[in-house]
Amino acid sequence: MIAVAAAGVCRRYGRRWALADVSFEVPAGALVMVTGRNGSGKSTLLRVLATAIRPDLGTVRILGHDVRAERDVVRRKIGLLGHRTHLYEPLTALENLAVVARFLGADPGRGALLRQLEEVGLGDRGDDPVQTFSAGMRQRLALASVLLQRPEVVLLDEPYGHLDAAGFLLVDSLLQRLRAQGATVLMATHLMARGRKLCDLGLVLEAGRLVFAGAAAQLPVPQGADAMGFAEGA
């Protein structure tokens, strides 16, 4: 089954094409790295897939549903971690997860929400206001909010951002868990070495155009630490 299908997708900001004729397919259950220079279109692509913005041209289908005609259906099947965490600062970590649960029409209870926090290393901070959290802790809580939704398609924009070494390992573990659960994951990241090791497939964008689509292990490796604007990660 094809989980994500894009055909001739274009998105323009003013006179600049952020995405230009992007086409690819992702099979269900795949873990995909989306990479490229800053400004190459990675975040724009994820936002189009998440129905946050509409493509100017082309079609996108998520699990067979058109993102234009069936936006509400698509939104129930995806989880998005964007650049902004969209957390409620005055509320505690537990209260933030409870808000997400209520939005989903669920009431999992304090114990279940605490277990979700434990999965991201915040089990002892459930009653602390988010406004007291570091950037890395907020990133962990945002990840917990996405996982709470149990989405079939997960879209992660720089999930390693603001995290320390322990946080990197946490994201690695969460990605493996999502794969084991059968979720399809598209992850925008600059960490090519890590992506090559963890992901099944890779997409490389350059100035809005898709210049590589294939096995992650075959991704072209930049010459030097920052030859193509990519930061390597261990």
Image: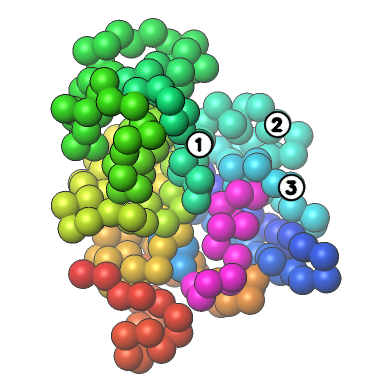
Indicate the position of residue 27 as horizontal and vertical percent values.
Answer: 46, 50
In the rendered image, residue 231 lying in the magenta stretch gets the answer no
Indicate the position of residue 121 as horizontal and vertical percent values.
Answer: 19, 37
Residue lying at 46% horizontally and 68% vertically, measured from the top left: 35
Q: Nearer the viewer, residue 74 or 1?
A: 74
Q: Residues within 10 Å of mark 2 (few under 14, many from 20)?
A: some
Mark pair 1, 2: CA separation: 24 Å
Q: Residues within 10 Å of mark 3 (few under 14, many from 20)?
A: some
Residue lying at 37% horizontally and 52% vertically, measured from the top left: 159
Against 22, residue 130 (above or below) is above
Mark pair 2, 3: CA separation: 12 Å
Indicate the position of residue 59 as horizontal and vertical percent values.
Answer: 72, 51
Q: Point out the stretch of residues depicted in magenta.
A: 36-48
Q: Amino acid at mark 1?
A: His
Residue lying at 28% horizontally and 54% vertically, measured from the top left: 163
The image quadrant of residue 13 is: bottom right
Q: In this figure, which residue is indicated by the disc labeled 1?
A: 86
Q: Amino acid at mark 3?
A: Arg
What label sits on residue 97 in the rendered view?
none
The image quadrant of residue 146 is: top left
Q: In this figure, which residue is indicated by the disc labeled 3?
A: 54
The nearer-to-camera label among 1 and 2 is 1
Q: Is residue 117 left or right of residue 87?
A: left
Residue lying at 22% horizontally and 50% vertically, measured from the top left: 167
Against 216, residue 121 (above or below) is above
